[in-house]
Image: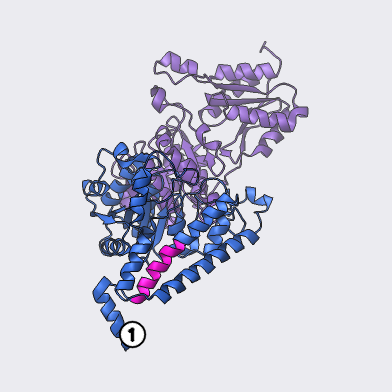
Chain colours: A purple, B blue
Amino acid sequence: MAVMTYREALNVALREEMTRDPRVFVIGEEVGLYEGAYKVTQGLLKDFGPKRVVDTPIAESGFTGVGIGAAMTGLRPVVEMMTFNFALLALDQIVNSAAKLLYMSGGQFNVPIVIRGPGGPAHQLAAQHSQSMEVYFYHVPGLKVVRPSTPADAKGLLKAAIRDDNPVIFIESETLYNVKGEVPDDADFVIPLGQAIVRREGTDVTVIAYMGMMYRAMEAAEELAKEGISVEIVDPRTLRPMDTDTIIGSVRKTHRAVVVEAGAGFAGMGSEIAAFVTEHAFDDLDAPVERVTGASAPMPYAKNLEKAKTPTKDKIMDAVRRVCYTNGG
Amino acid sequence: MAQKTATHAARAGLGIDAELARRLLRDMVLIRRFEEKAAEAYALGKIGGFLHLSIGEEAVAAGVTSVLRPDDYAISTYREHGHCLVKGSDPRRIMAELFGRIDGLSKGKGGSMHLFDKSTNFLGGHAIVGAHLPLAAGVGFKIKYEGGDQVIVCYFGDGAVPQGEFHEALNLSALWKLPVIWVCENNRYAMGTSLERALAQPEIWKFGPTYGIPSEAVDGMDVLAMREATLRAVTRARTEKTPALLEARTYRFRGHSMRDPAGAVYRTKEEVEREKQRDPILLFRDRATKAGLLSPEEIKHIEKDVNDLVDEAVAFADASPEPPLPELFTDIFKEA
């Protein structure tokens, strides 16, 4: 085990997989000479050379398509989106090509590609650079979608994503790059895609949360413990395929569920999980599933409005109290 | 010895030998007959969805492919039956795909617009205009990454040229010196929108030099011109790893798709009839006959062989079962 930042964990994962498999290469804007807009690819150009660390012009659809073409003929590209907001320019490539080539070709051409970069709310980056992007991808059959919350998960899940034979959307967060944590050194430390993790054990209510929201839920759980409410926190880690067994298992134990997501709630991850829990564990529920979501508005720039747009610890605590039919007093 | 002399004489005429002449004619006739049969099957309701025919444009696929090696790649649009056929796919399996049957190339899950054949390095069958051009650049990237000397041919229509991805992909292919042969099948209409109504610069080959790509406009109704231009481009791509842009000036004799009636208003009947005078099959047949490369008997023989092959393809497709229902959920993810 070594203590490192989330950013360093991603860097180590890339290095290990590039060392392990010569077919793996990194491609994107500013990934080489500039060493990454968020320094995730720091040092890779020096160590692996320009053949395997490929700087591109600003052409998201173009270089994502290059990755897909290379992947369908045998390479294993890791495409960096400087931020996932820019991935919308490549959405057709991702949805219509990467996700569907295996199906349309009747199983002949798989696309082992990872598309990674930061997404989700960041600090005062405003409407076009600060939004939850996973919703655009997890709807699509043929894509796997990962949101890793901790440095260890960042490493283990990125390695799994690179080794996966299918397209994987891997969305990090600007707000987590400096988070430190223990990370296994083992070069074969891989966390299988599709496995949730219980971050905190509890008995009264299950809170399902990932990324920054997971940390806020942990803070909320600490405070709620003082009120006598025992919160269990489940971090899905992979949004698709989703580990519904772990979520349902937890709800069957606690009989209550709150889903937290940073994105606007309409038809969001909270809707999906709430529907699934209701369909599969209705008889186990002692209260309706609650959702705590971002406000349904574009991300504003002003600090106070930005805070109002995003789920807070207090909003999570209120939702937990509601499903426990208590006002905290 | 006599045959050798004949071959030599023929070379002096058209620059090709009798064997190649047979292949070029056979490939063009195969595309034509295959698509005529497909149109019949469509009218009978055996093929559904969209069906886009390349009748009139056969010289492009046949001329280009005659230069390629089996390990070269090709990628195309939704008007790709011909490209797929001459790259070497089994016509029976293509027809079965059009019929939506389990023995189709994609088990019936792709259809007319999504033909793929890994065994011939045919990479699809893509139906978002312009979107497969970056993929072609990616295949070029892969070839260069592995140090191979293959090329990839990317067919697209004039309708893809106004798309951003055309420009992104051409730029990347030139910037990184990728062995991509960009073949624009300029049939002058993007569905119903003429070139002049879509492009400020309607001479498509002129976009090549903008990106530093050797380019030429080619008579797309002349299979030998297509072959020669492709040969120049492929030779350069293999040795220098540079892309090329060929603007094949061609014409589709049929509508944009089977849903485009013959009486469509975007072009005149007179224009269509005039273009039919440049039928690439008739032009080449006459030239090859006059040059003494093909006899009338040989031509009859080729046509009979092709007719038999296409009839067999239809019978095969008809006999093939629909994909079993579990196929709905296979091939979404590749299992480890």
**Foreground of the two, A254 or B151:** B151
Image location of residue B33, percent across then percent down? 48, 61
For numbered disc 1, what is the local secondary structure?
helix
Magenta-drawn segment:
B18-31
Hey, what amino acid is under mark 1? Gln
Q: Residue at x 46, y 64 (%)?
A: B30
Q: Quadrant of residue A252?
A: top right
Chain letter for mark 1: B
Residue topped by disc 1? B3
Instruction: Please tell me whether the stretch drawn in magenta is mainly helix, strand or loop.
Output: helix
Q: Residue at x 60, y 49 (%)?
A: B45
Q: Residue at x 55, y 29 (%)?
A: A214
**Foreground of the two, A113 or B277:** B277
**Foreground of the two, A155 or A290:** A290
Q: Is residue A226 above or below residue B37?
A: above
Image location of residue B41, percent across then percent down? 57, 54
Describe residue B108's horizontal placement relative to residue A302 as left or right: right
